[in-house]
Image (cartoon, rainbow, N blue to C red):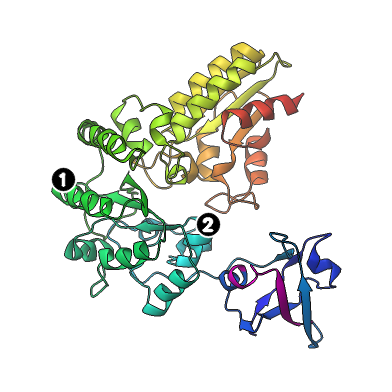
Amino acid sequence: MAGLLIERVLPGSVAEELDIVAGDRLLAINGHRLLDIIDYNFFAADEELTLEIVKQDGEVWEVELERDEDEPLGLIFPAPEPGRCGNKCIFCFVHQLPRGLRSPLYVKDEDYRLSFLYGNYVTLANMDRMELKRIKEQRLSPLYVSVHATEPALREKLLGKTGIIPILDIMQELATARISMHTQVVLCPGINDGEHLERTVADLLEFSPQVASLAVVPVGLTRHRKGLTHLQPVTGEYAAAFIAIWQKKAMDLASRLGAPFLFLADEFYIKAGLSFPPLEAYGDLPQLENGVGMIPLFLDEAREVLEKAEPLKNRAVTVVTGESPYHYLADFLQGLSGRTGVTLRSVAIKNLLFGDSVTVTGLISGRDIIAGLNGVELGDVIFIPDVMLKEGEGIFLDDLSVDDVRQALGKEVVVVESTPQGIYGALRKLG
């Protein structure tokens, strides 16, 4: 059926006062038929609205309303079904997944709407002219764009797709329409680094300030790459050499532009065993969800928490983590233990599911937690970072639940926000 299904109506909202309820369907606003939530956000911006609604019994209502500026209607809709990706990227993480994980993990999405709504990265290689026109007309900004390389032939090789519109042509249109873009390069050693990366950075700089940031992140490789293009991993030695060149370039660009533009993912510094730039070098953290600045932010917050932490009831708590942030977490927990009197220990979980090269916390499975804690003195409580779980569902990548882990280990398990304040707050709640 056409229109948008109303999932929830917020209590006390304009919509509730008009007797709109969950299960109704919103067909149009001011005569404009709605395709998705993007249309709703765009056409619902006016203060005077005429809503065409189909009630659950099939009755059609036409509702006229006037509201104060910025007063929300109070309608909540399901997230849009993502468009499917037509690329065959040589580094695609989905192609490297083993069997037996949550089924949505095998879906490759490529949807500019999700980029605008949630910050998902898209290549824009599967977009037609009508979609590009819509982005410009409805000012869907900012967008998050996976560039990888600006040279057309190299980009087609990386994306595994030919005949695509050159990315610089698309970005020129978007920049002219004043659409802001955050960009990324997944760095594949020997393929899009060196002079190719130099060219990509130079090309994207031409669109500044509409291209607001560029993150370089190392390619992620799992042990499930049979039959796929051979790719070189980013080793500690490679990462150190890369930082030696590109950290200075990033600093020079920031000085020239008056604000940070080029960012290196935390994983480079972790692999190289080198110190991070100061937190201020990351600006307003535009690439935080892309793994850029997470550890510097953690370290800064850790200092603040340790300054205010107070003595608590002595408990023995085990905090699990991935291998990448282990040392930073362990240092913080040592300091927090001294301030609170709580016995704290961290355990780095080895990633058996994806292999040794995958060390981030967010890709740890429930079974790997159970295996990693087998034979370990766990104390009274186990803290599990929320980034290991599907948001709102308490399910790990391998479909195990928190209860499954709790039963397997025979210990209380608490899901905590994966920040210093989150850990300290959870300790205080233990009593």
What secondary structure is found at the residue carrying circle 2?
Answer: helix
Residue 151 in the image: state x and y as whole percent: 18, 60
For label 2, the residue is: 118
Identify the image quadrant of the N terminus.
bottom right
Identify the residue at image location x=65%, y=70%.
Answer: 44
- Residue 388, numbered circle: none
Residue 226 in the image: state x and y as whole percent: 28, 58
Task: Say whether disc 1 or disc 2 marks the residue closer to the N-terminus.
Answer: 2
The residue closer to the viewer here, 218 or 115, is 115
Amino acid at dot 1? Gly
Residue 362 shown left or right of residue 126 in the figure = right
Residue 123 appears anywhere in the view:
no
Distance between mark 1 and mark 2 Cα atoms: 31 Å
Q: Is residue 48 magenta?
A: yes
Identify the residue at image location x=71%, y=75%.
Answer: 49
What secondary structure is found at the residue carrying circle 1?
Answer: helix
Amino acid at dot 2? Tyr
- The image quarter containing residue 194 is top left
Residue 207 in the image: state x and y as whole percent: 30, 55
Q: Is residue 412 magenta?
A: no
Residue 116 in the image: state x and y as whole percent: 49, 61
For label 1, the residue is: 194
- Residue 339 vs 176, above or below: the answer is above
Identify the residue at image location x=69%, y=59%.
Answer: 70
Residue 183 shown left or right of residue 153 in the figure = right
Identify the image quadrant of the C terminus.
top right
The residues colored magenta run: 41-55
The residue closer to the viewer here, 150 or 348, is 150
- Residue 10 vs 30, above or below: the answer is above
Total labels drawn: 2
